[in-house]
Amino acid sequence: MELVNETVVRKFIFLGFSSLGRLQWLLFIIFLLFYLFTLAINVIIISTIVLDKALHIPMYFFLAVLSCSETCYTFVIVPKMLVDPLAQKKTISFLGCAKVYFPFSFGCSHSFLLAVMGYDHYVAICNLLHYTAIMGYGVCVGLVVAACACGFTIAKIITSLVFHLHFHSSNQLHHFFCYISPVLKVASYHIQFSQIVIFMLWTLVLVIPLSLILISYIHIITVILPFPSTTGR
């Protein structure tokens, strides 16, 4: 009977803002302003790149994709964060919480897109004469698809590992959205394996893009340093 009670969680309750009382109105205003500012900046970047044909080159193409990724990431998380400070009951359904897969997908893809941009800078500086041939439209699209595929795959694995666990009937999350760590804390048992795999995947999401970026810029620096003049560098 105890096992049944633990496995029939229908919703989670957020406790992140509950202790702030009327200050939650202030949080709502701050979150709304930051969200509108971020959204406006990304829309301006994307619109400028799309409308200006002079910016239809790989570097700005990747920048536009990065802005789209950030817009989608905030669009999935922030609306719920705006609603909760004003709501009497800060709850979310189990299925709604499982949709954390989408912001994680964009977040992971964001890291790999930064690595792609680092590679683009490397080719632009170290292989300038062959840059146009190497970074064709098909290659750019392929790199973006590969980055998104890596991000979405890793996020899917993490989400599956977390939301196939059993949960306590208390279902209270000490956070303001369905982040992985607070969700794992209310899991009943058998979480050690999931924690290890999730830690390894998060490490890959951070280490692989960072390593690729460092390698790209190390090559860039080795090409630039031999230039005899400061102006050349």
Image (tube, helix red, strand yellow):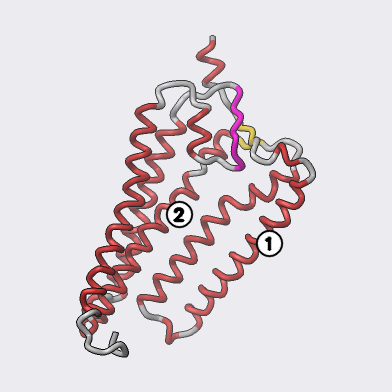
Q: Residue at x 32, y 65 (%)?
A: 116
> Does residue 125 show up?
yes
- The one nearer the camera, 69 or 228, is 228
In the depicted structure, whether residue 201 falls above or below residue 190: below
**Image coords of residue 217 (percent x, y):** 28, 69
Q: Quadrant of the N terminus?
A: top right
Q: Residue at x 22, y 85 (%)?
A: 227
> Does residue 133 show up?
no
- The one nearer the camera, 75 or 191, is 191
Q: Quadrant of residue 6?
A: top right
| Main SS of residues in magenta | loop
Label ID, residue 222? none
| Horizontal arrangement in the rendering, residue 209 relative to residue 107 (left or right) | left
Label 2: element kind: helix
| Horizontal arrangement in the rendering, residue 118 relative to residue 88 (left or right) | left
Q: Residues within 10 Å of mark 1 (few under 14, many from 20)?
A: few
Observer-side mark, 2 or 1, equals 1
Q: Residues within 10 Å of mark 2 (few under 14, many from 20)?
A: many
Q: Earlier in the sequence, mark 2 or mark 1?
A: 1
Q: Which residue is mark 2?
A: 106
Magenta stretch in the rendered image: 170-176
Q: Which residue is mark 1?
A: 33
Q: Amino acid at mark 1?
A: Leu
Q: Residue at x 77, y 50 (%)?
A: 25
